[in-house]
Image (tube, rainbow, N blue to C red):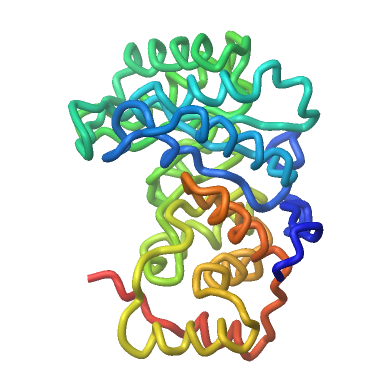
Amino acid sequence: MGDTVALSAARAGTVKLGDFEVNRLGFGAMRITGQGIWGQPADPLAARDLLKRAVALQINFIDTADAYGPEVSENLIRQALAPYDQYPGLVIATKGGMTRSGPGMWGKNGRPGHLREACEDSLKRLGVKQIQLYQFHRPDPDVPFEDSVQALVDLQSEGKIKHIGLSNVTLKQLKEAQSMATIVSVQNHYNLEHRKASEPVLQYCQEQGIVFIPYFPIGGNQGGMAEVKVQTIADKYGISGRQVALAWLLKHSPVTLPIPGTSSVEHLESNIASANVELSSTDMATLDSLSDLQK
């Protein structure tokens, strides 16, 4: 596991994302910003080097959002990786629909006018003419869901969006959006600890061939017997509990595309090494049986 020559996101296999094919370990670019996902990181050069290391490890799916920073993550991606044609097959996904008023503070805005402005601003920050995957970040209870989705449909018809994705949605919302557009991905909170709420969404995505992007894929400290079971499996393979969590996600469903985020090259490489882990059927049964531990 420590052999860096064997580190490659390609070892996780691939998944079809619309008409793109990407490796099944991506990179979530939320944590390359400042504390509270606000402002510049302490070391912008290190953040850009981290992004370059990610693509060097054959990560070809990077997920970001206008709200990360805000704007900081998208700007860092352009600074580090543009021109993008030097990385054939690289897909950069972003999101719109959330607002920021300070560190750790998040708001919702699903108004069509806001989504249009957000998308057009992301195009400029990323330095592209078309966003390969644009995701509605979170439904806004003050705006009809179909109005928000229609805004993305309109942007797609104008060529500003290639593919449409959703985030933080229920199965009902996913089906409603499907009646209006082709939805190629869903990004929901999902990991060993927190999965009951989105399990029906994942199963439906698997049936429909929709990519399921679990965010916070590693989770936190399970606690109690669950943590003991995860650590026992980790010790058997000589890996970390974080790697067990990622390996479980990869094997749990063929449509999962985990996007672990980090600001550390060491953690990035450790995450990619999870692609080398082949959990046994017994291990999978143990992990599958863990109850939803989120209070």
Rendered image quadrant of residue 5: bottom right
Nearest the camera: 289 or 76? 76
Query: Percent position (x, y) of residue 43?
Result: 43, 32
Nearest the camera: 235 or 183? 235
Q: From the viewer's perspective, is 235 left or right of 172? A: right
Instruction: Name the quarter where the N terminus is drawn.
Output: bottom right
Above or below for 46 versus 11: above
Query: Percent position (x, y) of residue 64?
Result: 48, 33
Residue name at image x 32 percent, y 15 percent: 114
Query: Percent position (x, y) of residue 295?
Result: 22, 71
Residue name at image x 76 percent, y 65 percent: 3
Q: From the viewer's perspective, is 178 left or right of 65? A: right
Query: Percent position (x, y) of residue 204?
Result: 55, 57
Above or below for 174 versus 165: below
Q: From the viewer's perspective, is 263 left or right of 35? A: right
Nearest the camera: 55 or 185? 55
Residue name at image x 52 percent, y 70 percent: 245
Q: From the viewer's perspective, is 83 left or right of 223? A: right
Rendered image quadrant of residue 285: bottom right
Residue name at image x 65 percent, y 57 percent: 272
Please state the total of marks drawn on the protein image: 0
